[in-house]
Image (cartoon, rainbow, N blue to C red):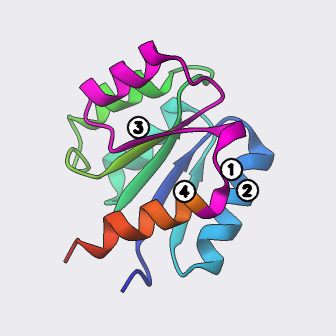
Amino acid sequence: MDLGRKVLVVDDELSLSNIIALKLKQEGFVPTVCNDGEQAVEALTREQFDAMLIDVLMPHMDGFAVLHKKAETRNAETPTFMLSAYGNQEYKDEAKRLGVKGYFVKTGTPLSEIISVLKEELSGQS
C-alpha cells in the first residue's frame, strides 16, 4: 500500500508545512519538509522521493525554478503536485507544462483531498 512512501513537502509557510507533514505521517507516509526552493533542490539531489508537494511562491527559488532543477536530479520522474495561495490560470498552465500532476489552491482544498490524491497517485506505483 502507501506505507513508507516518501513525500517531499516544500513550503515557506512553516505552520502549513508542519501540519501537512503531521497529516502525512498519520496516513503512513514519510514526509521530508523543506522551507524554500534551495533546500528542496538539495533534498531532490541527495534523496529519492515517491512524490513531491510544492508551493509556488517562496524565497530564494520559486516552485517553478525547483521544477526545472528537479528535471536534472534522480527525482526527474517523481510525481509532483503544486500547492499555492494563487489559483490563477497562468500558474496552472505553467505547472501543467512542467509536468505537475495536480494543482491545489491552499484556501480551497481540504488537506484530506490532497492526501487522497497522493494516495491514489502512489497506489499505481510499484
Kind of residue at badge 2: Asn
Q: Residues within 10 Å of mark 1 (few under 14, many from 20)?
A: many
Give the spatial CA distance, label 1 vs label 2: 4 Å
The N terminus - image quarter: bottom left
Q: Residues within 10 Å of mark 2 (few under 14, many from 20)?
A: some
Give the spatial CA distance, label 4 vs label 1: 13 Å
- For the residue labelled by badge 1, is the local secondary structure a helix, a strand or a loop? helix
**Disc nearer the start of the sequence (2/4):** 2
Residue at 68%, 35% in the rendered image = 12
**Disc nearer the start of the sequence (2/3):** 2
Q: Does the CB distance between marks 1 and 2 fall below 8 Å? A: yes
Residue at the outermost right position = 15
Residue tagged 1? 17
Residue tagged 2? 18
Report x, y in % for residue 49: 35, 60
Which one is closest to the eye, mark 4 or mark 1?
4
Left or right of 18 in this view: 74: left
Report x, y in % for residue 77: 20, 49
Kind of residue at badge 4: Ile
Residue tagged 4? 114
Q: Does the CB distance between marks 2 and 3 fall below 8 Å? A: no
Q: Which residues are magenta?
A: 83-112
Report x, y in % for residue 37: 51, 31
Give the spatial CA distance, label 2 vs label 3: 19 Å
Disc assigned to residue 41 = 3
Which is nearer the eye, 92 or 76?
A: 92
Which one is closest to the eye, mark 2 or mark 3?
2
Kind of residue at badge 1: Ser
Which one is closest to the eye, mark 2 or mark 4?
4
